[in-house]
Amino acid sequence: KFGFSMGQDCEDDNISAASEGAASIWKNQMKGSLVAGFRMALRAGPICEEPLRGVLIVLEGVEVAVIPSADGGYRCAKALSGGMVVSALRSGICCALLSRPCRLMESHLKLTLHSSLAGIGSLYTVLSKRRGKVVEDSMVEGTDLLMVTATIPHAESFGLAPDLFRQSSGEVTAPELIFSHWERLDQDPFWIPTSLEEREDFGEILVNGDSSTGMDNTALKYIRKVRERK
């Protein structure tokens, strides 16, 4: 959403006239480009160039340099194009976002499948390896099968069915996957171990050969995969 709040003019006549001229330039030449820049910045974020969620952008003010024009009004001191406004606002929003801790929002799928008692252990192992969470498991009346309902990140669902068949030796049915919800991946993709304790726990950056973190970082892995595809 985008909203505007105009400030009050100064009491001085000359400054008030200049402010009115700047406000006219803002409404007629800049406002539309500013909205376009805002939408472009939120449509493609700085990390994965994907839409942003749960972010509040506050533009505290706009300064327009004006000079008197021949017709008695005011005009911009320098030539101003819409592309300049769009680019400036988009770059400003991206820089502001990167100055604060960033997190990824990942989609989760709801999966439903049936498993025998012999394959339930393999099922839990596969789901745990793919960061899945079992929501409910119950016996199907009149059979020896368990109906399992779980959630799994969308990025971890690729190749799930063949993996389940291979690990359970066919004791698990093919999962039915539907979209469930969005969830924040609470992991800093740009975290770097700095203290002695962190380096002992996660390793040195140069030793592990990673340019950003000392250990396997799920958020960073997703970012790199998205950037490789794009």
Image (cartoon, grey):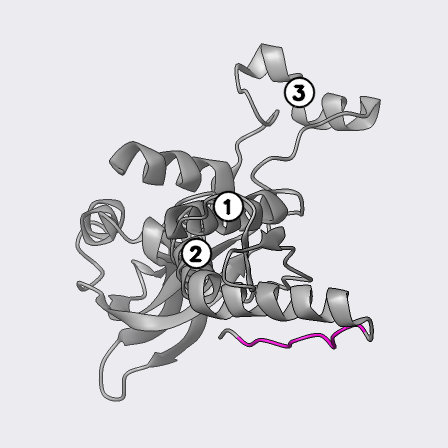
Q: Amino acid at mark 3?
A: Gly
**Disc 1 target residue:** 88
- Indicate the quadrant where residue 9 lies: bottom right
Contact (Cβ within 8 Å) of mark 3 with mark 1: no
Q: Residues within 10 Å of mark 3 (few under 14, many from 20)?
A: some
Q: Is residue 148 visible?
A: yes
Q: Is residue 66 above or below residue 139?
A: above
Foreground pick, 187 / 85 = 85
Q: x, y (%) of residue 204? A: 67, 16
Q: Amino acid at mark 2?
A: Gly
- Residue found at x 41% / y 59%: 33
Q: Is residue 5 magenta?
A: yes
Foreground pick, 176 / 67 = 67
The residues colored magenta run 3-10
**Disc 2 target residue:** 37
Secondary structure, mark 1, is: helix
Secondary structure, mark 2, is: helix
Contact (Cβ within 8 Å) of mark 2 with mark 1: yes
Q: How much space separates mark 3 and mark 2, taking CA atoms?
A: 41 Å
Q: How many marks?
A: 3
**Disc 3 target residue:** 203
- Residue found at x 60% / y 11%: 206
Q: Is residue 56 visible?
A: no
Q: Residues within 10 Å of mark 2 (few under 14, many from 20)?
A: many
- Mark 3 and mark 2 lie on one chain; the one further toward the N terminus is 2
Q: Is residue 103 left or right of residue 171?
A: right
- Residue found at x 53% / y 65%: 26
Q: Is residue 40 above or below residue 142?
A: above
